[in-house]
Structures are given as C-alpha cells and as structure tokens.
Amino acid sequence: MYQDVILDHYKNPHGRGLREGDAEVHHVNPTCGDEITLRVRYEGETIADVSYEGQGCSISQASASVLNELLVGKELPAALEVQRTFLELMQSRGQITPDDAMEEVLEDAVAFAGVSKYPARVKCALLSWMAWKDATAQALGEDTVTAGDERP
Amino acid sequence: MYQDVILDHYKNPHGRGLREGDAEVHHVNPTCGDEITLRVRYEGETIADVSYEGQGCSISQASASVLNELLVGKELPAALEVQRTFLELMQSRGQITPDDAMEEVLEDAVAFAGVSKYPARVKCALLSWMAWKDATAQALGEDTVTAGDERP
Amino acid sequence: MTDGRPVAGVPLDTEAIRKDFPILDRTVHDGKRLVYLDNAASSQKPRQVLDAMSDYYERHHANVHRGVHVLAEEATALYEGARDKVARFVNAPSRDEVIFTKNASESINLVANMLGLADEPYRVDSGTEIVITEMEHHSNIVPWQLLAQRTGAKLKWFGLTDEGRLDLSRIDEVITERTKIVSFVLVSNVLGTLNPVEAIVRRAQEVGALVLIDASQAAPHMPLDVQSLQADFVAFTGHKMCGPTGIGVLWGRQELLEDLPPFLGGGEMIETVTMSASTYAPAPHKFEAGTPPIAQAVGLGAAVDYLTSIGMERIAEHEHALTRYALERLAEVPGLVIVGPTSPEDRGATLSFTLGDIHPHDVGQVLDEQGIAVRVGHHCARPVCLRYGIPATTRASFYLYSTTAEVDALVDGLEYVRGFFG
Amino acid sequence: MTDGRPVAGVPLDTEAIRKDFPILDRTVHDGKRLVYLDNAASSQKPRQVLDAMSDYYERHHANVHRGVHVLAEEATALYEGARDKVARFVNAPSRDEVIFTKNASESINLVANMLGLADEPYRVDSGTEIVITEMEHHSNIVPWQLLAQRTGAKLKWFGLTDEGRLDLSRIDEVITERTKIVSFVLVSNVLGTLNPVEAIVRRAQEVGALVLIDASQAAPHMPLDVQSLQADFVAFTGHKMCGPTGIGVLWGRQELLEDLPPFLGGGEMIETVTMSASTYAPAPHKFEAGTPPIAQAVGLGAAVDYLTSIGMERIAEHEHALTRYALERLAEVPGLVIVGPTSPEDRGATLSFTLGDIHPHDVGQVLDEQGIAVRVGHHCARPVCLRYGIPATTRASFYLYSTTAEVDALVDGLEYVRGFFG
Ligand SMILES: Cc1ncc(COP(=O)(O)O)c(C=O)c1O
Ligand SMILES: Cc1ncc(COP(=O)(O)O)c(C=O)c1O
C-alpha cells in the first residue's frame, strides 16, 4: 500500500500550514487519533486555497497533500467529481482497479487504490477529503456539495 | 427419587391446614413457584403444633408432611438436631448414604436422600424446613435457633 | 440439507437436520434417547455454528475495530459481517440499526434506560406512562418496573382473556396521550400466543408512543421483518435461534438511535475522550461499550445463515404442523389442560399445560427420567400463572428438528406420569 | 505441559505451551509466521478452552437454573462450577461474590450505575466526588463521566508523572471526605505501570470511600487475590486471559452486593414478580439479568484451570524476564522512546513507544506486513496520549506464549520500518 507517490507526498507535503480561509473545520479519526484542521478559500466557484495542519499517519498526511495539489485552482463541480471518484475508489475494498478515465480524474490520488483493501486505513485516506467537503459546505452552503450526490 | 415413603406423604399429608400459632411465615421457592405458609405453636420448649398450607410439588409437600410428623411433640434442641441433619443430607449432592445413626434421627426423612442428587429439587425439600426455622426464630427469638450452628 | 434454495411448502427433512445437531445424538439416564422439548428456553446448536466459532478462535481472533494487523482486520470483518447478516435476516433498512448486546434482556434494559435519560419527546418521567402486557417475560416487565420506580412514570398493562390472548378491548384507555412506550411480546414464551402487532402499533402511533417488540420467541421460528412490523425497536436473543449464548440483538430505527443518549460507557463507543468530557461514536457503536461478543456474533451470523438456508417460511410451516398434531394428541391425555390458545392459529410451537393435580415439577422430573426434556415452573412469566390461578405449568416447545415421534413420546410419557402419581 | 504441579522458578516451556494455541501456527501475508504481540488487546485461546466450550454445546447445553431435566442440570452445574473456579482463582471469600458480566466494561458500568441508584452511605450524588486516574482505559473513564453528568457529582483524577506513574503527591486533596468511590487500574494497558494499591486503598478507607480496581490487565498475568487487595470491587474480562469473548467478571464484597440495588432487570435476577412489584434474588443472581453467558463461563472456567495448571507465579516471572529483555533490546532502536516506565520493576509486559516522527499507524502497518501484530493508536486511553503530547503509540504486549525470538523479530521489524520511512 505504501506507493512511492504516497511516500513522496508524506515526506514533502504540498500546501501544508494554515492560511486565511472562508471556513475552517476540524476533523478527527477517533480510531487512530488522526486529526486535521482545514481551511478553504473560494474565489467564486474557484478553489483559491486549501490550507491545513494536522497530525497523523503517512496515509492521512499524504492524502491531504494530494488533495491540495489536485483541488486548488479547480472549479467546485470538477473538484466534487474528483472527491466523489476518490470516495468511490476508497470504498471499493480493493475491488476497483483504476482505469484510464479514473486515472485522468484522480492523477496522483490513484496511488491510494491499494489502501482501499485496508478498512482501518480507508478513514485515514478520507479524513482530509471529508474535511474539505464539510468546509466547502460551510463556506458556500450545504446544497453546493450535495447537489451532485443524486447523480446516477 | 420418588420413594414410596415420599409418595405416601404426598398423597396423605400429615397435619396439613393452618391452625393457631405463635408465629406465621410465608416462604417461596422462586425457581418453581412452590409456596408455603407455616405456623408454629410452642408450649415452653415443646413444639405443640406445626400447621401449614401450601402449593408445590410432591417433594415440597411430602417434606412438609414429614416435618410435621417428625417435629411435633419434640423439644426444640432435638428438633434442631433433626433439622440440621436433614439439611446436611440434602446438601450432600448424593454423597451421603444415611447410616443407622442418621436414620434414627431422620426416620421417614431419610427417604429424601435421593433428592439431594437433584440440585433443582433440594430447595423444594428444604422449603418447609427453612420456613419452620424462621417461624421458630420469630416465636422464640433468633438465638434459640442459631445457638447450635457453631457446634463442630 | 442446507444446500440449494429453500422452497416453501416442501416439508423439512428433519432426519437430515437432526444430523447437524451433535447433542441430539445424546442419550440420558442409562441410554434413553434424548427428546429435547425445551426449545423456548434455549435451542441446540448445529455443527455449522460451532465450526464457525472454532474457526474464528483458531484462525482469526483478535480484538476488533482498532487494529491494523491481519487478525484484527479479519476479526473486524467477521464481526461486522455478522451484523450485515443479522440486518438482512430481519430486513433492517440499515446495518447500523443492529446493536449487539449480551442477550434480549440487555436489549430491553438498554431501551428502558435510554428512555429514562433521553430528552423530549422520548423522555419517560413522572406524568408519563409505560404500557406492557400481562403475558410478558420478566425481562420485559422488570426493566419497566425499575424505570417506573426511578422516574415516577406509571406502568400499565393489557390483561389477558381466558383464551390466552391479549385483551385489547380497552386499548384507547390503556394507551393514551401520556404513553411514551409500548413494549410487548410478539410470541409469548408461555402461552405461545402470537400477538396482533398492527392494532397495537396503530394506536401507539396515534398517540406518538414508541413501540418495542420482544421477538425473542419469534425470531427463531418465523420470518421477521422489522420494517413490516413498523415498530421502533425489536429485541431478540441468539441462544434461542441456533446461536451461541452471550449475544442478543437490539434493532432500532436509525433516527432514534441517533437521538437517544448512550447507556453504558467505555471503549468502542466513543469518538473522542478527554478526562473532562467525551463524545460518542455513531450508532451502533455508541451502544456497544467494551469488547463486543465477537465470536458470539460470528456464531449468530452462522446461525442465521443456517436458518436462512433452510428457510424461515418452511421452519414456520413445520412447527405449525407439529403444533397442530401436538394439540390433537395432547387433547387425548385425561386431565391435561392447555394454558394458552388451544387451536393452532396465531400461535407458536410452545405448549404449556397442567396435568390434573400433579405439580409440574413432578411431571417434568418423571418425564426427564424417560429422557424427555421439558421445562416446568413459571417460565420467567409469573404473572401469567397468577392470571390463570396456577402455580406453574409444564411446557413443551418445538423447533425445526422436532418430530411427530417426539410428540408421541411426550404423550406416552405423560401417560406414565399419570400412572405414577395416580 | 499442563500436567503436574506448577513450580515457581522453573521457566515456562513456551514451545510446549504454544502447541496449545492453534492460532499461533498460522501464517499471514504469504507464509510469514505470525508474531502475535497484541495480547493487551486480547489474548489467544488454548485448545483446552475451545474444547470445553465445544463439549458444552455438543453434550450439555440447555438454559440454566430453572430446569429439572438432565441437560439443564448439567448446564447449571457447569455454569455454577465456573463461578467456583473463578472465585478460587481470585481467592474470593465466597463464590456468591463473583458476578458474570459481558466484559470488564459492563462490570465497571454496573458499579457506577449501582452507586448512582444506591441509598446512603454509598449514594453518589451532587456534593460527592468520584476519583479516577489519568491512565484509565476509556471503560474506566466514561462510566464515571456519565455518572457525574447524571448525578451532579464531581469527577476528579490523579495525574501522571513524567515516568508514567501515578502522581500521588497530593493524595489527601484528591481523595477527600466527599469521595464516594475511587476507581483505578491495577496495570495500565498503555504504560504497563503496576499501581501502588495499598497507598490508595488506605486513603480511601480513611475517608470511607469505596474502591474499585480495574484488573483487566492484571488478572491474565499475575496472581490476583481480591482479599489482599482490600478493594470493594474488582473487575476483569475473559478474553484477555485465554477465555472467550462475551464474558467479564465483577467481584464485589458480599455486604455491598447485598445492600446495593439491581441494575438490569429481567429473568434470573428476580425472586418473585407480580405486575406491580418484584423482589430480587440474592447476589450474584441479582446482578445477572437474562440468560447468562453460559458457554463463555464454561470457557473462562477452563481458562483459569489452564492458567492455574501452568501457575500464575511462573507466568508473571516469564513475562517479567521477557519485559526486561524487550526493554533492553528496544533501547537499541534509534529514535524509539518508551512511553511508560523504562525499567522492568512494577510494570507489566505491555510496552508502548514512539518511533521518531513515524506515525504509529505506519509502524504497525509495516510491522504487519512482516507478520508482526502490534496495536497502534491511543489504546482506548486517549488521556494518556494527551498527557504525553503524542497522538498515538505503538504497543507490543506479551503473554505466556511469547518468546525472546518474538522480541527479536519485533526489533528487526522496527529497523525495517525505520529504513522504509527514513
Ligand atoms: C485496563 C483495561 N480496562 C478495561 C478494559 C475493557 O475490557 P473490555 O473491553 O473487555 O470490556 C480493557 C481492555 O480493553 C483494559 O485494558
Ligand atoms: C419472550 C422472551 N423475552 C425475553 C427473553 C429473555 O431472553 P434472554 O434470557 O436471552 O435475555 C426470553 C427468554 O428467556 C423470552 O422468552
């Protein structure tokens, strides 16, 4: 499960540190004590920044770094698609082998495919993503992040 | 366990019915719903009467009948000796085969030896005896029935 | 016989089924074949269930939920997999609605305690009422008596008709606007009565009361669908349904489980703890303090697999036919009086009776000497005995492995008992 | 190796002992030998225990206490026999002081709830105080937080020294005349610390407070004597001491068990029930509502037989030697910092540590890939992590079947982890 990409992000995290934002959330993974404080800043629908501080394992730290890399600069709908695809992959219990389409959406985040086989670690990988979604809901309103959830 | 002596006492109980007494107790065996209301009447240290009413199985009914037969007319110390011997036999888990000395004390009550192998039924056999001891304590004072308990 | 799809209408192959239950081979009292008719007290266990637990301990055991090692992950998957199985078995809308307890009694106590600690609109306190029935097992009486004592709420109950059914004639006076919870048994463990859920639930819903159904004697014997019952909570127990001792289930509606406060505190049920305050995990974990009954859940999961492979419909049909036969045969025994419904409609395969003046203890003992295991006493439902003015009953109760030959053995045994004490 | 009398001083034959535990033969991750160092979370089970439970289910199962048939009597004798065994194992003055619960968490919750419902002088209410420590398992924190919330009592605690021991320097201010109960762990499940019972009990007795000792991590590993502890209650759990899941124990002093009110209501715990009121059976039954964990008690009885046949003194010596060795070897690993006492005196065989900046989750996962099972996280004792300013620890914990070769495997594994994340 420890792909080089994950280890790289862990050792050299992107965008770590707390900067100004429109909303801040604090999420905890009670099973292991992983914690993240995360802020989002929007310019219209564009994600201007995702800044974070946290402690946790390589998976949770690398995942926050990947999130920052992937989402900053994206429009909200595109970011939500990434988030949903990542969630799908992580909840697949190792059943999904990412295809080209998925790789295009997830970029570095496909490296986490192997983590989905480890139920205890899936939460680590998702911690920052759940925090981001929550912060976005606070910044822009609940319906902005749930709108797409009904898609088939 | 159903010795003829037991069946006889069950079918033709001695001294059944409630008559006048110095004290009355009501005992219940919660595991099977056996109940007994028992009265004792003393003349000095002599047991003038043990009267009772109850519902229950052949063992509890026969045991009350045997109690009446054995104890009425006895002096308290002798009665306590019968009670203690019966208790010892019933708690023996089938390990004691009554010897002549025991038979002399217990008379018909030795027929209950077989019951001691059945833990669920021991309480039935003891119900009236516990009630009698309790009623005697009420009639004559607690120390009159415990006095002998410390004997070696 | 556990292969293939169960087909309703096709009778059970009890001979094959009995081979799954090692204990049914046992003899007692110097070689007498065991005739086990004490299933309402506890069922026997098929090899499939015992094997699942042994395999769990021999290959996969570890504590669940917090481990990153193989055994911990396997144990967690097996434990949570059992929750999935139980959820499917009772058609729960969500697996998170299935709470594992130690037995049905704990399940019921859990609800009683939650309601005593809850906020409005659920809170039971003085001025509110609790409704049960006169045919409840002590486990569905005493928790409510304790709650009433602690909170000042009033405990009310439905009485029984002479036929052994609930007397619902004054239902609107029993269940009122003050009623917070109605808790009743689906199938009585003494009378065998199958109670009319719909009428009670409808009235409870009218006044906004919650409904708890004690399905301890139903889950083992018939298809159970918590959604069609429309109750708020359903409780049952593992050991009566081919599962191990040490495990029970409480199903509860998700919104309720979210709103209600935790009961026992400890490991597993928390989100985060500091010395001064804690927050709680979402249900079901909020209600599962401490190391759960892991192997027992695995065993219960195997039990519901086993029952499902045979088919709950078929089990119900088998027991229904057996009950009809037993009612007919028992009617032949002079002096025998059934306590409970005397016709096979709307009743389970539990038959209580008295036999003339012979005390049930004596009936049971003499039957036992012939290898026939029945239960005697008040069956933890003493108010039923009080209601019918009897000290106790003898109870024969059947299960999927019971046979007409065993009914015949019972009838012969009872004849012998009559001769013995006659 | 379970024959003959255990002789203190003679080292354990771990090779023979390991043969009793089927799971220790397992391989994980493509043939890697399992190195199971997660015993503080749960121990493995010897064949003797599994056989006892299988034999129970295959030959003797029935519900206990109320039956007059052979199986019911055998099951009752086995269940109550297990109570005798446990009573002897902890040197209880009376078997009636041993209550079977579902786990240690329930045992502690039981006491907390009893005290909230009790009459004077035991009653915990506003104006009274509860004392625990900062090294408690959540199961000995949350029940007291809940009790404090429900009653208005004040929760206080002993802090920890930098060395991982209780800071008792202000004991007279922490335990005061207002203190009703002092509840503390005998051996910490994170730090391994063995706590000084006498000092705490003496002060508690001075002010008339009750004492509950959480012996969950002690009962499996050392001789336990409830009389010499002089506590009022002692709690422990079956699954950590070679027993099955689904069973715990609460020992309590007889007078207290007589005086205190029941907690859960139901079958088994009553004397007599009417619809309007009930009376309760004497202890221990008063506190055992519903069908008890029968097979689990039988398993726990077999577990204490097994442990006794080996000898608790010898097990303690074995683990002590192993701890000494492990502390030495772990000191060689660069960046490794023990959280808890660093010398083998007054500590159990549980070693928590941090490894540089590498998160314990990662340590545990990479160890697992090598077949080494350790636990990572806060081990249900988050305040300990908060106290030492760390998010989590890695924890290796030993038992009677652990070997120095396994310690070596751990040290090698940690070297590999360092290389991997270095
Ligand atoms: C010190 C301590 N207390 C209490 C417990 C709780 O035991 P259980 O989870 O079996 O209730 C544990 C174990 O998890 C423990 O280590
Ligand atoms: C109707 C009913 N409810 C509740 C119970 C209690 O189940 P348990 O003893 O497993 O808690 C029983 C069985 O004893 C029962 O028959």
Image: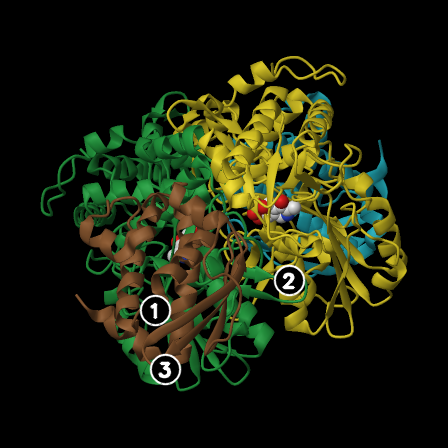
Chain colours: A cyan, B brown, C yellow, D green
Asked where in the image residue B42 lies, by quadrant, the reply is bottom left
Pointer 1: residues within 10 angstroms few (<14), some, or many (20+)? some
Tag 3 residue = D208
The kind of residue tagged 2 is: Thr
Horizontal side of A151 relative to D372 (left or right) equals right
Task: Tell me the residue at 28%/49% (across/down).
Answer: B92
Q: CA distance from mark 1 to mark 3?
A: 51 Å
Task: Tell me the residue at 84%/40% (across/down).
Answer: A148
Q: Nearer the viewer, mark 1 or mark 2?
A: 1
The kind of residue tagged 3 is: Gly
Horizontal side of B109 relative to A117 (left or right) equals left
Asked where in the image residue D134 lies, by quadrant, the reply is bottom left
The kind of residue tagged 1 is: Gly
- Residue D3 is situated, as x and y percent measured from the top left of the image, at 16, 34
> Which chain is home to disc 1?
B
- Residues marked 1 and 2, same chain: no
Pointer 2: residues within 10 angstroms few (<14), some, or many (20+)? some
Residue A118 seen anywhere in this rendered image of the structure: no
Q: CA distance from mark 1 to mark 2?
A: 38 Å
Q: Which mark is residue D274?
A: 2
- Residue C215 is situated, as x and y percent measured from the top left of the image, at 69, 43
Is C95 located above or below residue D221 in the figure?
A: above
> Which chain is home to disc 3?
D
Tag 1 residue = B73
Observer-nearest residue: C42 or D308?
Answer: C42
